[in-house]
């Protein structure tokens, strides 16, 4: 048995594409063979089905990713809100302890009269809140007035 002897070669060594009487499987999938055979592609339906399956899988994956992103956002927002609540509670507790300490100190200065210390501490706290609120309102109002004047000046046509 020699290498050049065609009878020794296995029949499966020849593919359909080497035979002139049959179009190859690949050419049958991708269009006419060039020998006058103009049958429609048999593999186009399979290609479209594969494309539809891949597209559907892509959209399912994107939906799952979106759902995971939404869940992660909800977790982050809830943690941030919990941190905000704890921070506000700590600030309120600090203010209360500060006011109680000032009231106790003033009570001692006023000869042990607790009611006088509490009353004076409340008056001081209310005055401080009033001053801070008035200052904040004035700052906001002046910033608004400045922006209004600047906008008015920009809209006014230039006079020669």
Image (tube, helix red, strand yellow):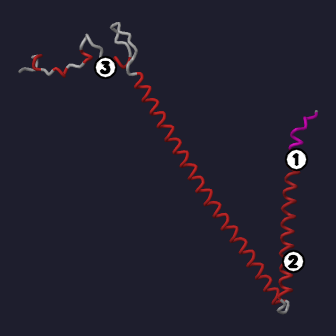
Q: CA distance from mark 3 to mark 1?
A: 77 Å
Q: Earlier in the sequence, mark 2 or mark 3?
A: 3
Q: CA distance from mark 2 to mark 1?
A: 37 Å
Viewer-side label of 3, 1: 3
Range drawn in magenta: 151-159
Give the foreground label among 2 and 1.
2
User: Who's the residue at 70% across and 67% down the image?
Assistant: 88
SS of the residue at dot 3?
helix
How far across and down, in percent of the image, does residue 81 sit? 65, 61
Q: Which residue is mark 2?
A: 123
Task: Please indicate whether residue 34 sits to the left or right of residue 143 in the image.
Answer: left
Magenta segment: does it hold 157? yes
Residue 82 image offset from top left, x and y in percent: 63, 63
Q: How many tags in the picture?
A: 3
Label disc, if present, on residue 148 of the rendered structure? 1
Q: Which residue in the protein does label 3 denote?
A: 25
| Residue 103 part of the magenta segment | no
Quadrant, the N terminus: top left
């Amino acid at each position: 048995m020699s290498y050049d002897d065609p009878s020794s070669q296995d029949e499966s060594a020849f593919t359909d594409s080497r035979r002139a009487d049959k179009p190859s499987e690949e050419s049958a999938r991708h269009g006419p063979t060039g020998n006058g055979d103009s049958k429609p592609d048999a593999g186009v339906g399979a290609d479209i089905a594969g494309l539809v399956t891949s597209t559907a899988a892509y959209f399912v994956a994107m939906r799952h990713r979106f759902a995971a992103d939404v869940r992660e956002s909800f977790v982050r927002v809830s943690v941030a809100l919990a941190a905000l609540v704890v921070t506000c509670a700590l600030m309120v507790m600090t203010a209360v302890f500060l006011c109680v300490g000032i009231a106790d100190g003033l009570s001692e200065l006023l000869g042990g009269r607790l009611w006088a210390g509490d009353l004076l501490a409340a008056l001081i706290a209310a005055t401080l809140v009033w001053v801070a609120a008035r200052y904040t309102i004035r700052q906001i109002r002046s910033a608004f007035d400045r922006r209004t004047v600047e906008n008015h000046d920009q809209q006014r046509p230039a006079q020669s």
